[in-house]
Amino acid sequence: MNDTHSCIIRHFNHYANLAEDDKQLLCDLERSPVDTRAGQLLWQESEPAEEFCTLRSGWAFSFRHLEDGSRQILELYLPGDIIGLREFAFSQRLAGVMMIDDGVICRFPHQHLLDLFQRSATLTTILFAVSSCHQALLTERLVNLARRSAFQKICHLLFETYTRLERTGEGGDGRFRLPLSQEQLADALGLSAVHVSRTFTLLNERGLVFRNRHWVEIPDLQALSEACDFNGCYLNDNLRKLGAASLAKIPAPSSSAG
């Protein structure tokens, strides 16, 4: 099996070394791929929540529409992410999800996740870790929206995104693709599109960030981190430190359970 063909395997490998059986279970979640287009809705808020999807390629975001007609972008989904995980316990969608650029998704019903829980303790543990990381990202997004300046907000989002992309080999050498428009960045950060544009101009003038269409170059990662007082503790999970041996000691669920 060529792991480089599966974003979700590369994503999960960040948390722990996967056995071949676990890799096959993850590949089962990427069956029946569906091509998607930029701007395509995957689902709307309040629709029935009956399935998840994996993002094989492309970017997406979750959002809520407010009473005044404005939009707040809640989460950014990158290749390898699972979309809809936090709605597992709910009967309705808590937010809409839209594709940012062209991509490929793989839909799977909730029952498939229950099957995965029964068949792999390692993947169950990792899914708890993934869910915890999603919660940490949302918490940090709340702090970013409420307590940082526009300059810090954009610096923080760029550094966070670059760090996340490194996990799946999508970013490196201080350069990465950022397919969000000015309006989408504004909706994610609680700013106006004009303010976003002015801040990127300032970042360019200070030599911190250079943006050319959908590509971003960060010449000095440490300088950008210091500019927004970035504390990456919420991205530095502890699961891998448990070691593959510790995960292997977790007894496999009984096939006769239930």
Image (spheres, rainbow, N blue to C red):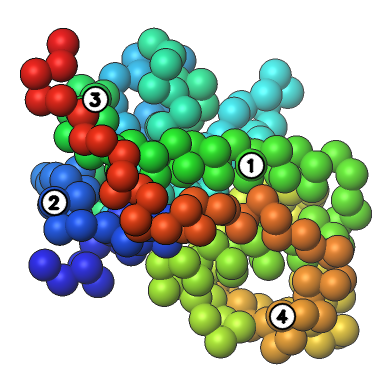
Q: Secondary structure at mark 3?
A: helix
- Type of amino acid at the residue the image marks with label 2: Asp
User: Which residue is under mark 3?
Assistant: 114
Q: If you read the primary sequence from the N terminus, does the residue marked by circle 2 or circle 3 appear first? A: 2
Q: If you read the primary sequence from the N terminus, does the residue marked by circle 2 or circle 1 appear first? A: 2
Other-residue count near label 1 (Cα within 10 Å), few / some / many at <14 / 14–19 / ≥20? some
Viewer-nearest of labels 4 and 3? 3
Contact (Cβ within 8 Å) of mark 2 with mark 4: no
- Type of amino acid at the residue the image marks with label 1: Ala
Q: Secondary structure at mark 2?
A: helix
Other-residue count near label 4 (Cα within 10 Å), few / some / many at <14 / 14–19 / ≥20? some
Other-residue count near label 2 (Cα within 10 Å), few / some / many at <14 / 14–19 / ≥20? few
Of 53 and 258, which appears nearest the observer? 258
Location of residue 193 in the rendering, given as x and y in whole percent from the top left corner = 74, 55
Residue at the image position 52 percent from the left and 81 percent from the top: 172
Q: Is residue 56 left or right of residue 179?
A: left
